[in-house]
Amino acid sequence: MGNLLKMDFLKLRKFKMFFVFLLVILAVTIALPILGKIFSNILLNIVENSGEGQAIAEAEMLVEEFNRPYALSNIFRAPMGGLSILWMLLFISGASFMYMDLANGYVKNIAGQIPSHGYLAVSKLVIINIHNIAMMLVGVIGSLIGYGVSRGLTADADIGAGIVEFLLKILLASALSAVLLFFTTGLGNKALGIVLGVFLGLGMMSLLYVPLNFALSRLLDKPDLNLSAYMPDQMVLMTQINVWAALIEGIVLTLVFLFLTMRFVNRRDVK
């Protein structure tokens, strides 16, 4: 198992898409707050020339907001700068990495050293979690730099809760990666894994939750029911998530889809 982990970690270190996306995440999370401040000042100059009092007041409020120190808790609550497209990059990169062995063939001498071919799935999930944590930490570092340069930072009272939420999002990312692992490594379908990664990253699965939410709200007579607030792919995009829902769903989904992937991999001949 140790050799298998080393082999997969070496593959990750040589995986070009991973490092390209790391640079993209870093650049975007640094630039976003800086550009926000620049554009707020440009907007103020434009509306001042227009002479409209209400518009000027609103623009001044926006500039004031971008000059206020940014809370550290918000950075940890939105480790990808609050951008769903960066989560999409994380899942696309993860799905592509998990399919590599099927595209190139398993390594016979490694597979022969482990008691079960299902361990190949375990190793992949361990390494993909390293992949996810690295991307999320880079997103946090980029936001720290961007907000630190443009607005300054403040250690607010919710910093502890923000870090807890960051850790829960690592767990949720692990659960969603386990789902992708099932489709890419378990079923051997890279295209479906990539498409699902796009849907998960962009939060597009919410389109499926709308009719389900409507049906359940009518059935349970709860008009204020919000199913999306309890779905893992939606929680990674949200702030101030339900701690218990994230914890339970993260653990259960990871274990269930890892088990299913191991079963499918055990049935496949090592090439």
Image (cartoon, rainbow, N blue to C red):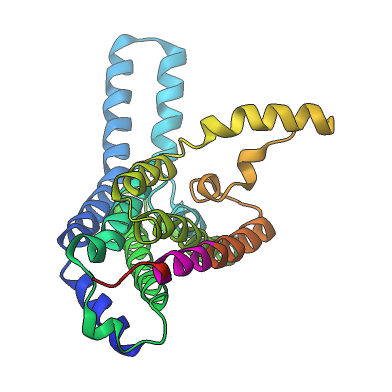
In the foreground, 190 or 238: 190
Q: How many marks?
A: 0
- For the stretch drawn in magenta, the main secondary structure is helix
Residue 33 position within the rendered picture, expressed as x and y whole percent measured from the top left: 32, 45
Magenta highlight on residue 269: no
x 60%, y 51%: residue: 240
x 31%, y 70%: residue: 269
Indicate the quadrant where residue 143 lies: bottom left
Residue 232 position within the rendered picture, expressed as x and y whole percent measured from the top left: 55, 51
- In the image, residue 163 sits, relative to residue 206, either above or below, namely below
Residue 217 position within the rendered picture, expressed as x and y whole percent measured from the top left: 76, 30
Asked if residue 211 can be seen in this view, the reply is: yes
Chain part drawn in magenta: 257-266
Q: Residue furthest right?
A: 221
**Looking at the rendering, in which quadrant would you find the C terminus?**
bottom left
In the foreground, 49 or 109: 109
- In the image, residue 228 sits, relative to residue 19, either above or below, namely above
x 69%, y 27%: residue: 214
Asked if residue 224 can be seen in this view, the reply is: no
- In the image, residue 194 sits, relative to residue 53, either above or below, namely below
Magenta highlight on residue 262: yes
In the displayed structure, does residue 98 sit left or right of residue 236? left
- In the image, residue 259 sits, relative to residue 198, either above or below, namely below
In the displayed structure, does residue 70 sit left or right of residue 235? left
In the foreground, 46 or 106: 106
Indicate the quadrant where residue 34 lies: top left
**Looking at the rendering, in which quadrant would you find the N terminus?**
bottom left
Residue 17 position within the rendered picture, expressed as x and y whole percent measured from the top left: 19, 57
x 43%, y 58%: residue: 182
Indicate the quadrant where residue 115 lies: bottom left
